[in-house]
Image: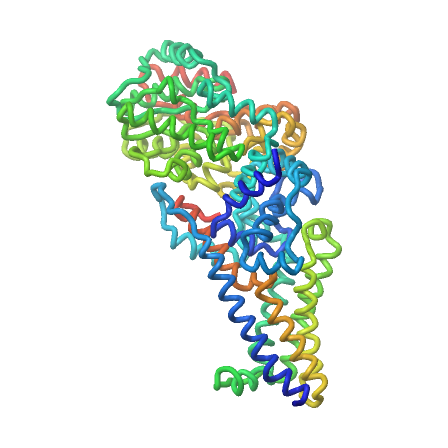
């Protein structure tokens, strides 16, 4: 039993299982808390409000764009960059094809990978720098916020180092960091990757019945 | 009092909607940009999401998925203490008007105002309600209104009835509409009663006011006491059912509309047997149907202050504008009007809380900036008596020269009453 086998086989399946089961359980348990039927007479549609809120909050509205431009730019740079790397980095496409879906697609060329990685890193670093420097964010941040950021940063960094797939040690380090990230995910605020839809949707549904979408 | 009671009360407020809000917050702090209390002080503790911290701690410790595991490995948040609750009392009662503007800017769409209101239930359980609010709630339960003593309503109505020359019958059964009023209207802006009498006479509406359930203000809703809030809603429901009305007219009062119309049936546990209609909705409907006609135009440069609970959180946004368009030739909109409007600074029970007065006045600077940007505004129209009172006080403090006018009264001034009309216009112009 080699270390790379351990990391790529049992540990991978364990972490992926913790991730999938943990995320599903957390979402199920959240929804299972339940809520009472709204007995007021609706002026508008709850469903329509939910959809509107989910879409509306992709972009700052209400006159706040200039004040929140930093978050908008850094946030989208990081998140879009991360998703592109996750789905289109050449080793990931191979991994998804061989280990998960059995189907692959055209990966990013190397230059595009580097450009995307730089954008994603810039976004993440700027967001974290603001978290430790802005008085408001310092007041409201906790250990989970920092841990989630750092685990993501390490997974991305080790991924870049392992891009060439020429060194087993680098590949093991990347796989390990990703597996720690996957295990941490369902227990942390990284869950916002899923709960944002519930939050926006619930708010939109409440106010959609009232005929307005804040 | 013990922290455990507060913890239980807070846990009882967490349903899947509140949990989704608490789960989704990423601590980005953008909500601070929308909060007038943060904007005028620059103090990070006023960041809206920080006000959710006590209920968030209860959620993560006792109710969240995996909370048992987290407690077992020592990663759950510490249990709330009485000191924590005392520390958050100012944040929850004095520095949040429940205006909900932070929801606009939140990338997760979190309704922080609702979470703050529900969090107040914990402070109610811990006996940490600010004295002013608590006393107002006690008066509301015992005497029927936080401000109006027994017998005062009858005198005010009689005076208004005589002034406009229209009989107003109290406790009249079999009418279509029951009018409820906010204490602030009866106390300070009682002309609205005469205005309603004139408008309803022209529209041919049958209406009454109940002497037992005239008060629209729901101080229990504001302070976060589900029991008191339910008692006050039930009083209106019982009266409406006893009088057999088809409609209850929610007055120019922000949270009264939310408390009775949107949350009222959920508090009493059954659908209303009547329809709640906001006065602005009704006026606009009557205007559209040709039952209320106006004549003449107000030439002053006027703007409209959207009460948060009526517009952003109540959905009544187009109606006031349509009404103003009928009676004004010089109406201008503030930047970010409608759903994005800036709060007066005194909603959500803040104006009933003497402890919060200094900060409330200070917070008006945000509203003032919005008004000043327009330049040369000669009157500020609104449709919430509490906003009106708060705005008038702040306008005095800031030494501005700006009359604040209730929209219902403004409509009544321009009613097409034939011969009587010119006198009403003359009086208003003189006041201007």
Of B296 and B229, which appears nearest the observer? B229
Residue B18, image x, y percentages: 51, 49
Question: Residue at the left extreme?
Answer: B174
| In the image, residue B402 above or below residue B2 | above
| In the image, residue B57 above or below residue A173 | above
Residue A84, image x, y percentages: 58, 75
Residue B101 falls in image quadrant: top right
Of B420 and B224, which appears nearest the observer? B224
- Please give left or right for residue B293 compared with residue B337 in the image: left
Residue B380, image x, y percentages: 52, 29
Q: Residue at x 41, y 28 (%)?
A: B251
Numbered marks: total: 0
Of B375 and B96, which appears nearest the observer? B96
Quadrant where the N terminus of chain A is found in the figure: bottom right
Q: Residue at x 63, y 80 (%)?
A: A112
| In the image, residue B236 above or below residue B420 | below
Asked whether the viewer can see residue B374, the reply is no
Question: Residue at the right extreme?
Answer: A133
Of B234 and A14, which appears nearest the observer? A14
| Colour scheme in use | rainbow
Residue B291, image x, y percentages: 28, 28
| In the image, residue A176 above or below residue B66 | below
Asked whether the viewer can see residue B59, the reply is yes
């Amino acid at each position: 039993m080699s270390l790379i086998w351990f990391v790529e086989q049992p540990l991978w399946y364990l972490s992926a299982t913790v991730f999938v089961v943990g995320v599903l359980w957390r979402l199920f348990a959240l929804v299972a808390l339940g809520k009472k039927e709204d007995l007021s007479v609706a002026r508008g549609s709850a469903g329509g409000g939910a959809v509107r809120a989910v879409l509306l909050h992709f972009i700052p509205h209400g006159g706040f764009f200039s004040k929140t431009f930093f978050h908008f730019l850094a946030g989208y740079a990081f998140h879009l960059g991360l998703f592109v790397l996750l789905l289109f980095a050449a080793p990931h496409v191979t991994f998804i094809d061989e280990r998960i879906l059995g189907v692959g697609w055209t990966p990013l060329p190397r230059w595009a990978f580097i450009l995307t990685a730089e954008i994603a890193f810039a976004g993440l670093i700027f967001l974290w720098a603001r978290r430790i420097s802005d008085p408001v964010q310092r007041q409201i941040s906790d250990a989970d916020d920092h841990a989630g950021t750092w685990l993501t940063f390490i997974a991305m960094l080790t991924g870049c180092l392992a891009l060439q797939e020429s060194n087993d040690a680098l590949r093991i380090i990347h796989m390990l960091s990703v597996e720690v990230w996957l295990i941490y995910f369902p227990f942390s605020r990284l869950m916002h990757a899923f709960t944002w839809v519930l939050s926006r949707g619930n708010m939109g549904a409440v106010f959609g019945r009232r005929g307005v979408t804040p | 009092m013990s922290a455990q009671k507060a913890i239980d009360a807070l846990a009882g407020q967490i349903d899947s909607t509140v949990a989704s809000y608490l789960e989704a917050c990423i601590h980005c702090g953008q909500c601070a940009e929308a909060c007038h209390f943060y904007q005028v002080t620059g103090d990070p503790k006023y960041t809206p999401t920080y006000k959710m911290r006590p209920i968030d701690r209860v959620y993560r410790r006792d109710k969240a998925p995996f909370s048992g595991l987290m407690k077992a490995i020592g990663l759950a948040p510490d249990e709330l203490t009485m000191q924590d609750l005392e520390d958050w009392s100012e944040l929850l009662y004095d520095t949040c008007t429940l205006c909900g503007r932070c929801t606009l800017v939140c990338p997760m769409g979190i309704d922080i105002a609702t979470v703050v209101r529900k969090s107040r239930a914990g402070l109610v359980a811990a006996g940490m309600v600010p004295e002013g609010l608590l006393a107002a709630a006690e008066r509301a339960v015992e005497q029927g209104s936080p401000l109006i003593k027994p017998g005062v309503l009858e005198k005010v109505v009689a005076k208004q009835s005589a002034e406009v020359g229209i009989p107003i019958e109290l406790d009249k059964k079999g009418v279509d509409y029951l009018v409820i009023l906010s204490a602030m209207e009866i106390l300070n802006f009682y002309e609205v009663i005469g205005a309603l009498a004139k408008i309803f006479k022209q529209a041919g509406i049958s209406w009454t006011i109940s002497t037992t359930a005239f008060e629209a203000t729901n101080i229990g809703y504001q302070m976060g006491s589900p029991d008191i809030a339910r008692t006050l809603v039930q009083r209106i429901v019982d009266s409406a059912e006893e009088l057999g009305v088809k409609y209850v007219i929610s007055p120019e009062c922000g949270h009264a509309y939310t408390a009775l119309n949107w949350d009222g049936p959920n508090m009493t546990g059954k659908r209303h047997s009547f329809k709640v209609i906001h006065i602005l909705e009704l006026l606009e409907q009557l205007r559209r149907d040709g039952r209320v006609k106006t004549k003449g135009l107000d030439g002053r440069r006027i703007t409209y202050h959207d009460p948060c609970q009526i517009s952003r959180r109540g959905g009544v946004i187009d109606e006031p504008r349509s009404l103003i368009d009928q009676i004004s030739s010089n109406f201008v909109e503030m930047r970010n009007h409608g759903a994005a409007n800036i709060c007066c600074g005194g909603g959500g029970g803040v104006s009933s809380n003497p402890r919060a007065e200094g900060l409330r006045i200070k917070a008006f600077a945000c509203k003032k900036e919005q008004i000043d940007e327009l330049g040369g505004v000669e009157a500020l129209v609104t449709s919430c008596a509490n906003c009106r009172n708060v705005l008038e006080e702040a306008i005095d403090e800031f030494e501005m020269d700006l009359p604040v006018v209730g929209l219902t009264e403004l409509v009544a001034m321009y009613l097409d009453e034939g011969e009587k009309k010119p006198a009403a216009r003359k009086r208003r112009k003189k006041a201007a």
